Image (cartoon, rainbow, N blue to C red):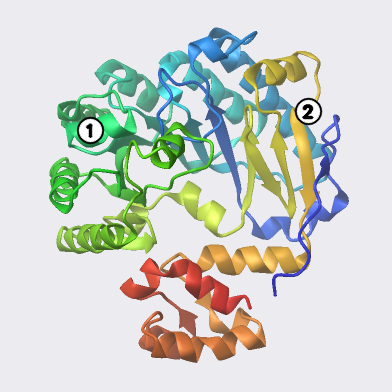
């Protein structure tokens, strides 16, 4: 099932998309991701394409909103030139980095660019990530007044020594304040947590989960700490300065957060995400997991339109140069084979509660479902109704389930 991997080529400087992207376009929604690549400090565990002020070298934060708006206009023109149907964006997501390092008016201008060049559906979900120390009540009210509907706060932990290991700079006592300000502005609230930080105990994690729940968010994400190659944290672990995350402890932490969230009225809908209702799920992330279309704006951002995937030049200065010259910021591009698209469909949908309709699986994968049920990884009841849904044990071993469905 793995099949041949797609071969990446340089992205064309005119950004022209092949005619194949029109196939099935009426059945796919369109989303927009706006990457804001700026951070006040670089966290030791992070390998995202982000830059502190001293790393910009030829790029200015103050110019970024105009540069991003230029790519938004380029995206709208490219989509129309490809003969795609008019599809206003159903979701818009500002990620980073720290989008809220920019003035609120810059985020509003970028959203207005999407509204003008691509359009927004009447019920569009519009989210920004934010650090608790990067916004105040006026900032959040400005976003809400401009049409933002949702904010995702990077809480990560409520325990000072855990935040220090992660090199997060905010005061954990500020989280309830910013959540309250967001609610007063009329925004839905998501809180992000990280578990498995070196030195974090189960008691520490319990404290963080309880503190997050005490803010009464609409949505909560809990991600296990992944040690990415090339990060400061990876170097610290290699040199013995900090311990390697304990996978067994991480499993205990996952089971704890899932139990606490269920008791508080949340339901999981993706392995690392829980919400209080279907309406408070992240529709933007669901678009990724369901292999919809999205255009990624900004340095290093990735896009996917109709089986064509590309990624932008990484450094903000190179990105600014492309925008000033009227060229596509794409650095590389690949057209996914039917085999690769099917592999990714199974990989992504397996992680969601909606799961995969069993009749849509290849024959050999359908045979594997019985074994997954016997091993306690897939619910028997939902399988009998024709759908793969992971059990709690299956969520802990989701990668193994995917391997057995894609042999």
Is 319 displayed left or right of 143 in the figure? right
* Residue that numbered label 1 is attached to: 179
Q: Position of residue 231 (x, y in %)?
A: 48, 34
- Along the line of sight, the residue nearer the viewer: 122 or 183: 183
At x 61%, y 65%, the residue is: 345
Task: Determine if residue 23 is in view.
Answer: yes
Task: Determine if residue 186 is in view.
Answer: no
In the image, residue 204 sits, relative to residue 262, either above or below, namely: above
**Circle 2 crowding by C-alpha within 10 Å: few under 14, some 14–19, many from 20:** many
Residue lying furthest front: 239
In the image, residue 216 sits, relative to residue 142, either above or below, namely: below
Q: Sequence-wise, which precedes: disc 1 or disc 2?
A: 1
Q: Position of residue 150 (x, y in %)?
A: 37, 37
At x 56%, y 37%, the residue is: 33
* Residue that numbered label 2 is attached to: 328
Determine the CA span between mark 1 and mark 2. 38 Å
Q: Position of residue 57 (x, y in %)?
A: 62, 10
**Circle 1 crowding by C-alpha within 10 Å: few under 14, some 14–19, many from 20:** many
At x 43%, y 30%, the residue is: 147
Q: Position of residue 106 (x, y in %)?
A: 49, 16
- Along the line of sight, the residue nearer the viewer: 94 or 336: 336
């Amino acid at each position: 099932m793995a099949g041949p991997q797609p071969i990446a080529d340089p992205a064309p400087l005119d950004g022209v998309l092949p005619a194949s992207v029109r196939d099935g376009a009426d059945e796919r929604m369109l989303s927009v991701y706006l990457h804001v690549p700026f951070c006040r400090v670089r966290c030791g565990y992070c390998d995202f394409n982000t830059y502190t002020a001293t790393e910009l070298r030829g790029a200015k934060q103050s110019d970024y909103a105009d540069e991003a708006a230029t790519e938004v206009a380029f995206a709208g023109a490219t989509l129309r030139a490809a003969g795609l149907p008019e599809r206003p964006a159903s979701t818009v997501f500002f990620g980073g980095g720290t989008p809220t390092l920019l003035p609120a008016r810059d985020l509003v201008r970028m959203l207005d660019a999407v509204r003008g060049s691509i359009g927004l559906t009447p019920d569009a979900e519009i989210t920004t990530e934010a650090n608790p120390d990067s916004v105040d009540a006026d900032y959040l009210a400005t976003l809400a007044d401009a049409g933002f509907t949702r904010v995702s706060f990077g809480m990560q932990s409520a325990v000072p020594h855990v935040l220090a290991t992660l090199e997060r700079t905010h005061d954990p006592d500020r989280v309830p304040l910013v959540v309250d300000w967001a609610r007063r502005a009329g925004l839905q609230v998501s809180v992000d947590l990280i578990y498995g930080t070196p030195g974090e105990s189960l008691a520490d994690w319990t404290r963080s989960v309880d503190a997050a729940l005490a803010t009464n968010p609409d949505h909560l994400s809990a991600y296990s700490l992944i040690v990415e190659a090339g990060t400061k944290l990876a170097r610290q672990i290699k040199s013995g300065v900090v311990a390697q995350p304990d996978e067994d402890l991480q499993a205990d932490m996952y089971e704890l957060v899932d139990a606490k969230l269920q008791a508080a009225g949340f339901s999981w809908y993706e392995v690392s995400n829980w919400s209080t209702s279907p309406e408070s799920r992240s529709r933007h992330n669901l678009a990724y997991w369901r292999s919809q279309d999205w255009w990624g704006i900004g340095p290093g951002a990735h896009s996917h339109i109709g089986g064509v995937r590309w990624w932008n030049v990484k450094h903000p200065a190179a990105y600014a140069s492309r925008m000033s010259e009227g060229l596509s910021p794409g650095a590389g591009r690949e057209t996914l084979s039917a085999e690769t698209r099917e592999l990714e469909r199974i990989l992504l949908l397996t992680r969601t509660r909606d799961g995969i309709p069993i009749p849509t699986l290849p024959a050999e994968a359908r045979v594997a479902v019985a074994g997954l049920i016997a091993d306690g990884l897939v619910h028997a009841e939902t399988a009998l109704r024709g759908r793969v849904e992971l059990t709690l044990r299956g969520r802990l071993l989701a990668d193994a389930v995917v391997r057995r469905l894609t042999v």
